[in-house]
Image (tube, rainbow, N blue to C red):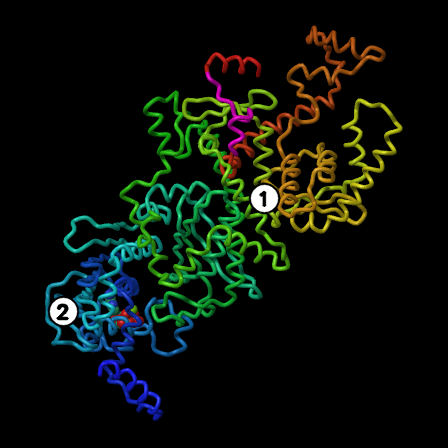
Amino acid sequence: MEIDEPEQATDSAAVTLEPPRIRRLDESVVNRIAAGEVIQRPASAVKELVENSLDAGATSISVVVKDGGLKLIQVSDNGHGIRYEDLPILCERHTTSKLSAYEDLQTIKSMGFRGEALASMTYVGHVTVTTITEGQLHGYRVSYRDGVMEHEPRPCAAVRGTQIMVENLFYNMIARRKTLQNSSDDYPKIIDLISRFAVQNISVSFSCRKHGANRADVHTVAACSRLDAIRTVYGVSVARDLMEITTSDDNPARSIFKMDGFISNANYVAKKTTMILFINDRLVECTALKRAIEVVYSATLPKASKPFIYMSISLPSEHVDVNIHPTKREVSLLNQESLVETIQTAVESKLMNSNTSRTFQTQAVNSSVYTSQTSHISAKKDPQNSAFSSGTKSQKVPVHKMVRTDARDPFGRLHAYWQDGPASQHEKKSDLASVRNAVRLRRNPKESADLTSIHELLSDIDSSVHSGLLDIVKNGTYVGLADEVFALLQHNTHLYLMNVVSVSKELMYQQAIRRFSHFNAIQLSEPAPLQELLMIALKEEDVESMDDENDDLKQKIAEMNTELLKQKAEMLDELFCIHIDQEGNLTRLPVILDQHTPDMDYVPEFLLSLGNDVDWENEKECFQTISAVLGNFYAIHPPVLPNPSGSGIQFYKKRREGSPTKDLGNALANPEDAGEDDVDHELLSEAETAWAQREWTIQHVLFPSMRLFLKPPKSMATNGTFVQVASLEKLYRIFERC
Ligand code: ADP
Ligand code: MG
């Protein structure tokens, strides 16, 4: 018989084609369904209650939670309280003190406006309100169920403000309660939520603790600055790695807004983005903006770190539609695209420029350390050795702060809270590569080139990194130049010689790959004629042979190379910002490292090698070889003019006719013999400037950028690029040479 049953059921289903009756739902069912939408989980109840307290002008808000909010949520504030005569309708649906006409929505400043939150809570939990208004001798307490008071308000003792208690949330929604009980509890989400409110509302003190606990898990007092608030909530280690950022737009054709906030710098390390976003003081989410910023981070910084972002955006209230989401966690903005783009650009330029400011700081404190914290500690231990301390230790997150910053705890972040199922799956998929891909496609919609090869080159760089060297590079301190090619680098108690030329070559190569297809441009003051420059390079290559007959051949080679480069001009321009015009002149070069322009004396070699050394056939090899040629050109080579501070001074002595060699020999034997007047002063001062400039660039551009961007390949550990200076004796010898 049992087997027959399904058959019967199918039969009857097929026969019954009559439409089912439509019935009016019982009002209590309607209310409960609606309530379930507004109060999706304990954290959303907390959000509504805290927003009510803020709307009531509270300067102190404390939250107590039991069982992740399922047993108890209690929010107490010192706001203006609720009038006695309003208590009967307080928890009815659509009762509010914040809105009277629909048009008010356009200008609404308060966070609530629907009059739904408290009502909803009474449909899915037991709500008790205790409140007192100013000037009253006592307060009132009253409990609500399904929108109505369970009894007349009872007089009671009360301190200023309102306390709302929600007990047994979802007691009548079995499925929801079960799901919530099975998943991890909402407490971390609540903590995260309060943390965010605390960062935004710096004149309000917040506390949040578990019922029965003595210690609050978030506790802030009204702070003097936003950064103080961030430091209190997220910890010193986060606050230390933040940079202030502001931007605005007031072009009605694009967007009108102001944004200020803080974003993490290159030192910050996290596996997930923390984005605290307030639009017109409302805690909201904006996936488009978040993605846009993540994309900038992954495209600009080599570390696979996700950013920490706090942003507060204000725009004319008539440009924001606050009423598009049941929990108001999303808003819709006029001209959102343009706003996102403006902010993205601001973030990008902030990141690009951040490396320099950080370095100046490092250098200014005599290379001791990155932060006052560590410098203090190391100075105490051994003032002379303060330079030995490395930044690594200080960058670790204190364990007790990890609740909110540890990537292993997804509930420690609000975005985990706001992004349910499908959204977080999407998050997982958007790995670095696809984000990179996205940014490039976004920025160059016409670009259809398959970028897998660039991704491969990037992962080649990642996979060949030498971790020991990486540590040295990241945390080492610049000591000075040892000679024309080597710089001295101090890391912990070791000194290293570092080949500036090969390191800068590799750095420029890696940056060229990273910035692939979105370089800024360096405009040459005068177009540089390819053919002539190629001739110079060819002649220099062949300096030994004084054979003029070869000139024809060289001419031919130069011509062919010019033609070749002209043919490739479009690609070179679009992907590498190397612009060659129709007449065969080089007019533009890419910015590979901000604040750094290549030494123009090396343009001929660059062009020759662009013509000769690039593999144009295979896409990956092509991008790689062009980047390598660029890397070589932008590397910090010794200037073409010999260093005048050593025996190179000979070069600047005016040669007496007839005996150049003899003269050189004499001068080498007796450098002092070089009389003042024998020296070509103009050339000498040019050389001195070039060498001083180079030293400055090494210290202020190469070192900081290297720290941020270089992923030293394993080969550098063995090919003489980095050499550990084993003993002090050796060190002295090097110093003697300087
Ligand atoms: P809304 O915030 O959308 O107005 P709610 O249901 O959240 O709706 O709250 C209803 C009303 O109750 C509010 O408009 C406000 O007047 C009052 N109220 C709620 N919480 C508080 C509080 N903590 N302090 C003072 N008044 C409150
Ligand atoms: Mg409200």
Answer with left or right where residue 541 lies relative to residue 458. Answer: right
Q: Residue at x 56, y 33 (%)?
A: 702
Q: Which stretch appears magenta? A: 713-726
Answer with left or right where residue 478 lies relative to residue 375. Answer: right
Q: Height in image: 719 above or below 190?
A: above
Residue neighbourhood size for the residue with mark 1, other residues' Cα within 10 Å, grouped as few (<14), some (14–19), many (≥20): many
Q: Disc 2 marks which amino acid?
A: Arg
Whether residue 224 is visible, yes or no, is: no
Q: Residue at x 76, y 14 (%)?
A: 678
N-term-proximal mark, 1 vs 2? 2
Question: What numbered label is drawn on residue 141?
Answer: 2
Which quadrant of the render holds ligand 1? bottom left
Quadrant housing the C terminus: top right
Q: Disc 1 marks which amino acid?
A: Ile
Residue 386 picture quarter: top left
Residue carrying label 1? 513
721 drawn magenta: yes
Q: Are marks 1 and 2 in contact (CB under 8 Å)?
A: no
Quadrant housing the N terminus: bottom left
Residue 4 picture quarter: bottom left
Does the Cβ of the disc 1 residue fall within 8 Å of ligand 2? no
Q: Position of residue 714 (x, y in %)?
A: 51, 32
Kind of element beneath mark 2: strand
The mark lying in front, picked from 1 and 2, is 1
Answer with left or right where residue 171 lies relative to residue 223. Answer: left
Question: What numbered label is drawn on residue 621?
Answer: none
Q: Residue at x 46, y 15 (%)?
A: 727
